[in-house]
Amino acid sequence: MSSLAMSSFVDQQIVLHQFTAKHSVQARAMLGWSREDLSRQAGVAVEAIQQFENHGEVDDDVCLSLAFRLEAQGLVFFPGFAPGWGMSARRFEPAPAGPAAHGIISRLMGSTTTSIDSPTPQPNGA
């Protein structure tokens, strides 16, 4: 079942009022997608995307397909603002684990203990 069929009428109306042509252009730029990429991902003709992004009239289904596909990538849309990453989007690398992370934490905490990742001082002449 498609996401369009699963979404409620109210959700669709909200999307239609919040998602703009400018959002589509900005979202593609954020994702590094061309119109052709979005066309493949959303199942919408490239010409329809071009028409929408040039502020032309398109069917509501085209707008909804584009918005829902871009939202599936973690983007959120609000009128008057550029798209942003939603709270559930994981667009960052996880923090390193292990000794290097411990050394950073020790330095941030102001610890006076020696980290296991720092070299052991050698006596003179060794």
Image: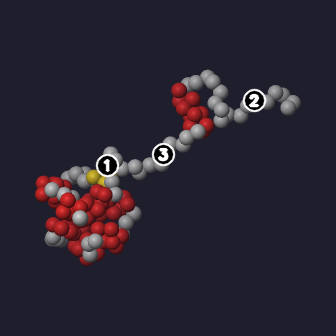
- Gap between marks 2 and 1 measured at Cα: 47 Å
Residue 116, image quadrant:
top right
Query: Which residue matches tag 3?
Result: 94
Q: Is the Cβ of the residue at disc 2 closer than 8 Å to that at disc 1?
A: no
Identified at 48% across, 45% down, the residue is 94
* Nearer mark to the viewer, of 3 and 2: 3
- The amino acid at mark 1 is Gly
Is disc 3 surrounded by few (<14), some (14 to 19) or many (20+) residues within 10 Å?
A: few
Identified at 28% across, 71% down, the residue is 43
Q: Is residue 63 above or below residue 86?
A: below
- Find residue 104 and report its horizontal and vertical position in percent: 56, 34
- Gap between marks 1 and 3 measured at Cα: 17 Å
Q: Is residue 52 left or right of residue 114?
A: left
Mark 2 or mark 1: whose residue is earlier in sequence: 1
Query: Which residue matches tag 1?
Result: 86
State the quadrant of the N terminus.
Answer: bottom left
- Gap between marks 3 and 2 measured at Cα: 32 Å
Which secondary structure lies at badge 2? loop
Query: Which residue matches tag 2?
Result: 121
97 or 109, nearer to the observer: 97
- Find residue 106 and report its horizontal and vertical position in percent: 57, 29
- The amino acid at mark 2 is Pro
Which secondary structure lies at badge 3? loop
